[in-house]
Image: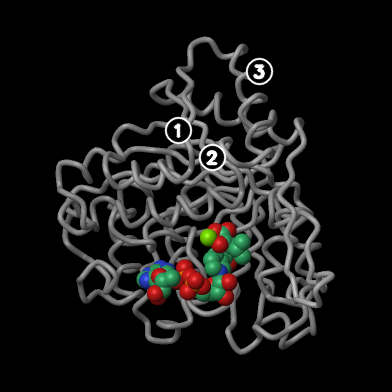
Amino acid sequence: MHIAVLAGDGIGQEIMVEAVRVLEALDLPGLRLDHADVGGVAYRKHGHPLPPETLDLAKTADAVLFGAVGDPELDGLRRELRVESAILGLRKELQLFANLRPANAFAGLENLSGLKPEIASAIDLLIVRELTGDVYFGEKGQRQTEDGLRQGYDVMAYDESEIARIAHVAFKAAQGRKGKLCSVDKANVLQTSVLWRAVVEEVAAEYPDVELSHMYVDNAAMQLVRNPGQFDVIVTGNLFGDILSDQASMCVGSIGLLASASLGEGTKGQYEPIHGSAPDIAGQGIANPMAMILSAAMMLRHSFADETNAQRIEKAVSTVLADGVLGHDLGGSASTSAIGDAVVAAVQK
Ligand SMILES: NC(=O)C1=CN([C@@H]2O[C@H](COP(=O)(O)OP(=O)(O)OC[C@H]3O[C@@H](n4cnc5c(N)ncnc54)[C@H](O)[C@@H]3O)[C@@H](O)[C@H]2O)C=CC1
Ligand SMILES: CC(C)CC(=O)C(=O)O
Ligand SMILES: [Mg+2]
């Protein structure tokens, strides 16, 4: 069980400490954790946000546990060196095209999300976000128009094989859940989405047991707040999935609660919270480590087929939240390490 531990920047460092403590508390046989620099930390030490030794470790390890990258002091770096390029680079290099972002209600948090409690408590959905295409990876740049105006561009493009492979992941996920898949696009305006919808329909023929629907992304954003309980699995592109998952996190209660798994064809995966480095709270010891801890649970499930320990972590997190050990993001006063302590104690019970 060889894990590359890439804590990254800002609160990434703080929450990773807690996730590692939880993993160590499980007494996993053969657990080997190798740490490496990524993001702004890596740029400052090695001159690149994704140094070759970090990439090598990520490639040779069985799985990657990733904190977050992002350092406002380095925002002016040229595109290839922007610290966020490290995460995009890892996803591309490791061919992790499927990002699973589950969002489910936690007992005790029903009153904290801003939604009516009966609406919030019905949340049990999975966003399947395509991760290696779309505007993040299309041709991009800045140029001058014929009128001499500066113009920025990012090409949105998906080919049919990219759409089909993420659709298969989503249909299979729906088969293992409530059998409902909603494909989210903007097919009333975007040609990329017209193709997306057509290919998802073609793939649907192989999954007659899954009920497929389509929804425009603007409506989906609204429906996530109006009635999130209507969704089982959502499949969508990179940009829409990025935005909708941050939104879904607040329907549950906080962005500090949502984990994710980035997967490819094999068992290798990268596991990370959906949030970023949160520079506004970094260094204060108040970041919520639950998303990072739950990402470690997803790692045990997907990369090591260790459902027992994945559930041990997930149950511990639920218990700690239900007991009212809440971070500042949820209106409580528990510090990052106090939340970590509580989860460690709960997994050992
Ligand atoms: N996967 C990654 O590495 C990601 C990196 N980023 C980068 O992170 C930096 C900050 O980006 P933002 O847009 O501010 O997004 P962010 O997700 O870092 O923070 C958004 C807001 O949520 C709060 N927040 C986030 N995680 C939290 C946690 N665990 N506990 C409590 N509060 C939490 C922050 O304090 C902030 O107010 C940027 O450089 C951005 O590019 C953003 C998203 C993902
Ligand atoms: C650098 C961004 C693409 C990361 C992000 O916001 C995400 O993956 O959710
Ligand atoms: Mg995001």
Q: Nearer the viewer, residue 205 or 339?
A: 205
Q: Dot 1: what SS? A: strand
Q: Return the residue at label 2.
A: 128
Question: Which residue lies at the image location 70% right of the left edge and 54% below the top edge?
Answer: 91
Tell which tag, 2 or 3, sits nearer the viewer: 3
Residue at image position (65%, 83%) is: 75
Evaluate if marks 1 and 3 touch, with contact meaning CB atoms under 8 Å apart: no
Q: How far from the left and from the top, in percent, is residue 2? A: 67, 54
- Residue placed at 58% from the left, 84% from the top? 72
Q: Nearer the viewer, mark 1 or mark 3?
A: 3
Q: In the rendered structure, which amino acid carries the disc numbered 2?
A: Val
Residue type highlighted by circle 3 = Glu
Whether residue 304 is visible, yes or no, is: no
**Residue 198 place in picture, x, y as percent:** 65, 24
Residue on which disc 1 sits: 233
Are the two marked residues, 2 and 3, in contact with CB atoms closer than 8 angstroms?
Answer: no
Quarter-of-image position of residue 47: bottom right
Point out the tag, 2 or 3, that comes first from the N-terminus.
2
Answer above or below: position of 83 versus 252: below
Q: Reading the chain from its start, which is encountered first: label 1 or label 2?
A: 2
**Residue that carries the numbered disc 3 in the rendered image:** 202
Position of residue 271 measured from the top left corner of the image (x, y, whole percent): 56, 54
Q: Please tell me which of labels 1 and 3 falls first in the chain.
A: 3
User: Is residue 134 something one can see in this rendering?
Assistant: yes
CB contact under 8 Å: marks 1 and 2: yes
